[in-house]
Every structure is written in structure tokens, then in C-alpha cells.
Amino acid sequence: MLSRRTTAAILVTLAFAASTLSTPGTGIAASASPPRLTSRVASGQADAGDGQRPKSAPTVERPPVQADEAHAARVRGSSPDNLQRLVTRVAQSPIETLAAAVTSCPDELVDLRLWNSEHPDQVRIGFRREFRERRFIEFGANVHESDKGGGGALRRHADSVTWTGRIDVEGAYASRLILENVTIPKGAQVWACGVDAVAQGPVDRRVLSPDGTMLAPSVMGSQVWIEVYVPSDVRERVSFELAGVIEVFDVDENGAPRLEATAGQAPRDESCLVDINCVSHPDRDLISRGIGRMAYYAGGGYYVCTGGLLNDIPVDYTPFFLTANHCVATQDVVSTLEIWWDYRRSGCNGAAPSPSALPKSYGGTLLATGSGSDFSLLRLSSAPGQRTYLGWESGAVPSSTLYRISNPGGNPQVFSTGVLESGPARCSALPSTSYHYSDDSQGGTAGGSSGSPVWTSGGIVVGQLYGKCGPDPSNACHPANSTVDGRFSQTYQYISSWLQQGGSGGDLAGTPTNLAATAPSSGEVRLSWTDNTTVNVVFHIERAAGGGAYQEVAISSVNATSHSDFGVAPSTSYTYRVRARSTVDGRFTAYSSPASVVTPSGGPSAPTGLYASRIKKKKVDLRWTDTSPDEDYFDLLYYTGGAWVSYGSMPANSTSVRVINLSRRTVYRLGVRSCRGATCSQIVELTVMTR
């Protein structure tokens, strides 16, 4: 029976707080051009649109819960043997060495310090560094001479094949390797370790971002070993490019890398921050296990924020994670998440733990996000055992006293207490209907605390941190500032289906109808359907070949009603079905009725081994293997607006093309196919990002 109040809670999650961004004069702290390919390639872009607001859900009451030891054991599982191979690595020369940042990229260090000076509530702790030469790695369980080791060590073991490589980043505090254009099968894993020889990971295909990028686990120190592990029973091959590294810095209270002098700059006042171990609270240790320090990559920078785990109605320990929209708001960013759990000092103002020894989570799925109450709800790929899943309250706040645990600056946990303010909102851009205002009575927050859950007695979440409002929002300890949190009562209407139904998200009205499939050539199937929803949606497209099981093959652009599938083979029967997913709250419709088609025969065979032999600021060199003896030409394509578009052709027997006039630091999805007349092969594709 539903009660008047809503309190669903579990204490367990971790998140970094990338706090808020100061807008001069407002007293509030918080948080590409169309692509051109070559003369053969036109420009194009897609419109994502905005979701509509769903109906409010009834309130429900749930307490926080703690995962038991049986659940913890299931989470821990067993460690594969490759851990030992990684830690006891053989002597190996680095395949890439980057000079110390202070000498090789001084401008980036200045930019990092200036960013943190100008955005004290959105803490950046690192930036991307490119390798001089990208290394293309490709191998499978059956290693043979044509496999490309890229300068690393490729080895066969009794139960697996591994590729191991070493990267040196001189003087680095910590690093995360960047892999791009990644193809990784189920069962394959990526591990990393640093000079402390403590294996970190694994990460797998669940953290692969939509643009084909994967970040390896972070490691401490100036040397990084990476191992890609493929069990012997996995038939698919692994391929990726070693593109660069995120160098992570230990920043001081001014946000400057500690290797730099601060040029006489007065340190920021963070004297009000209170180590969690220095306070006494009955729920302190329990809730601490549900709060996570987040680090994530966005737009070339590496940032920190905070977040926490939420309980759901089935109490099935689904790792739902609440943080702020201004921290993470896209799936690409969520895929780069690394969360540190239990990051707190050994005692009151004691020593910080070694990051290598902390339990961690990597990546997840963005379920819902919104700027109205500044929230993002994620489902993490995994959460370690012994976590607390916080409770929540979707109705009125049951108490005027608020509590918080956060990781300011990405540093160990601090504790704060506040009292709710009454009266009108102090900042007009943050209305009191969507935000709580409170006065800090003990401790405080700073950049990196953003997204941290605020809770009442018993671990009941009533919001998540936006930032500061007042005369000096850049000053964490100014007594006249107010602390501002997005109201959970406003957020709840967008996430209730997830929390009430254990992650299913419920059903959305408006099942697609009139699905039709045609095959204009042996390498293409064209689909069309009717969109019957009343909110903005994307369509998940699934395909079954020859009566086999359905597999998802594409996600359309927002509100699309057609799609071209180029991943098909000649003379093959295919059956399709589609369903819509709301961009507001992640709910799905039921599936459409199926549609079947048989592709014609006679097309040329598709090229293989497409890769980028060189990627520069505004151009990309593509290479492939010509497998067809009788094509008339090769077709170059670019993916835009949810569909492939042809931009020109290359002569028969071509094996390369240079794509020029691109935009800098832009992701492009390119494809090549062989054609005979109007009949073309499947498209082989590659996602690249220019420098």
C-alpha cells in the first residue's frame, strides 16, 4: 500500500563531486560545427530534442539497507589467473614514453590551474595527452603471425591469450590509458597496474562508450602496464588503438598541480571542512560505505564529483547511483567513470589510504538526467560488496537538519551538517520549488562535493548537491553563503519507475507499429515504422538472422521513423523488431510486430581490416583489405542523423583513402563498402576522433 511519503533507500554508491561553476554577478555557484569530410563528403548534423515531463508518481517509503556478506561474496567472485601474469610482468621496454608534463606541456598545466581558479566548484584534476604514434593492436584467442602486437608482448597461455604493453609517463602522479576504436568481445578484460604492482580492474565491454572509446583503470606512478585478456573459448577478436593517456595530478587547495608553484596566490579557505573521522554520528560509518568519489573524462579534461547508492523497492541491490546533472549528463561521460569507495582517512585528520587498495567501480548506464533539479541517475556496471544503499524521501522533508558526506577536491571524505532555510530562494535561477537552501552548521562542501546526497536522520536522501548561493560562492567557508541541493521530491517523478520496479523502468505507452523491411541491395536492409509515443524517444532496433536469437544492432536518433542496416550479408533471411525508449526516464515500450526480409544475392564481398593508419588534426588516413575480385568501386560513407550517407567513391582495387577538412577533436563514424553497380556489400566501419 502506498503511503503519503516517499522514502526508497539504500546506502551504497560512490561518486566524485565536480561541484559548481561560478557565474560573475549572479552569486550562484554551480556548474561542433557540422563535420566536413573531403570534396567527396558533405556535412550533416542531428537534432536530439528535449524530453517531455512525465506524470508524477505516487510517493513510497523505503529505508536504507546494507548488502549482506552473501551478496558481497557474489560480487567479489574469483580473480582470473591473468592477475598474476600482470603483476609478475616480464621485463619489457616501454612502447611509448611521454616526457614530464612540466617540460612538454606547460600550457596545459597553466590552463588546468586557471580553470580551477575560475571554476572553484568544478575541479579538474587532469588532461589528455596524445601519443606521438598511435599503436593499432589486434589479436584473438588463436594467435597467428598476422596478429598485430603494436610493440607489446602477445602471449598464449593454457586458458587464454594476453597482450601486455608498458607506457611511461615521466613524473606522473597517476594515469589512465585511452583506447579508441575498440572492438572487445564478451569475456575479454582489460587490467592495469603501476609501479606499486597492484592490479587494477578489470574493465570490459560494459564500459565501452558509444563512440568506441574505453579508459583503462587508473594507476599510480610514472609507469603503466596494461594487459588485455581473452579466454581461449572466445572466438571473436580484440582490436583497439592506443591513443593517449589521461595524466592525473595531485592538486592543492587552489586547484594547482603540486608540481607547480602557485605564484604567491593565497590559498582558498577550506578551514571549515571536517574530516569524517572527527565527528560522531550514529549513521556515519554505515552511510560512508554508500558514498563514492567519482572521476570522469569530458571534453579533454578529467574531473571529480561525488555520488551515492540508492535503495529500490525490491531491495535487490541494483547499483542505482545518484549524482548531479552538471557532473555527468551523457552516456559517453558515464562510460569513463571510475569510482573509489571507502576513501577516508585512517583516523581524525590521519593518513589517506592508498588509492590502489580501494574497492572500485567502473562505468555504468545513464538512466535519467535533468537540469531542473540538477540530477543524474545511473546504474553502475557493478558495486563491490559491503555497500550501503541509501533510503530516500519523495515527499516533504521529514526534518530540518541535513547531513552530508562528500569528497571535496576528490580528497578523502568530509562530514557536514546544515539546517534548512525558510522563505524565498536567494538565487532566482534556483527556485525553491526545485532546490533546498540550507545553512551549514558544522563542516562544509567545496569543489568536488557536487552530486553528494544530502540526507536526514536514518540515511533518508532528500536531494543532491548543486553548489553555493550567496555573496561569495567561490569561498567554501563564507558564513553568508547558502548550500543548494536539488530536491529529490522533484527528481523522483523522473526516476520513480526505476526505483519502484528494480531497474525494469516499467512500460511506456505507444508501441511502434507498421514496421516494414526492404532490401534494395545485398548489403542493406531499410526499415520504417510508425512512432506512436507522445514523448521524445529513441528506437532500439533488434535483428535475428535465419531464425536465430534477436540481437540489438542499432539505436536510432531521437524520434526517427526509419533506419538503414548495412550489417547484413547476401542471400540471408532477417527478422527485425523495434521498441521505443523515453529520453526522459529510460522506460521502454513493448516490441513492435516483427518484419522479415531476404537479402538478394550477387553482391561483392565486403572489405576487411579497416583501420586508421594516421589521425591528425583535420585529416584521417583509412586503410583496408580488398577481398572482392570484381567490385566496380568502393563507397565511402559517413554516419549522421541516425543513418549512413554516401559521400563519394574510390576506384576498384583501392585499399586506402585520405579524408580531409575535418573539424578538430571531433568524433567521426566512417564506413567503406565494395559495390558492383547498384549492389553493395556490408559496410565495415570505424569510429575515429581527430586531434
Image (cartoon, grey):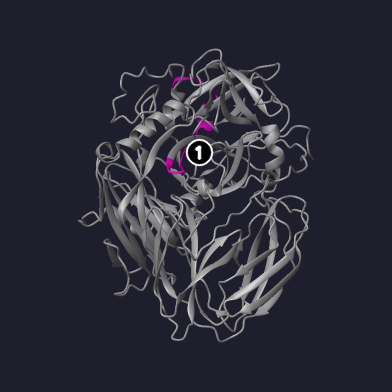
Q: Which residue is drawn at 77% across and 39% down?
A: 56
- Tell me where residue 301 appears, x and y as whole percent: 43, 40
Visible in this render: residue 594? Answer: no
Q: Which of 522 and 169 is in front in this view?
A: 522
Q: In this view, does 588 lie to the left or right of 327?
A: right
Q: Residue at x 62, y 68 (%)?
A: 564
Which residue position holds label 1?
14
Q: In which quarter of the image is residue 570?
A: bottom right
Is residue 524 magenta-colored? no
- Tell me where residue 538 appears, x and y as whole percent: 66, 56
Q: Which residue lies furthest to the front in this view?
A: 39
* Element type where label 1 sits in the image: loop
Q: Residue at x 64, y 64 (%)?
A: 541
Q: Which of 254 and 422 is in front in this view?
A: 254
Q: In this view, does 175 lie to the left or right of 669?
A: left
Q: Give the range drawn in magenta.
A: 278-301
Q: Quadrant of residue 101?
A: top left
Q: Is residue 375 above or below residue 669?
A: above
Q: Nearer the viewer, residue 605 or 540?
A: 605
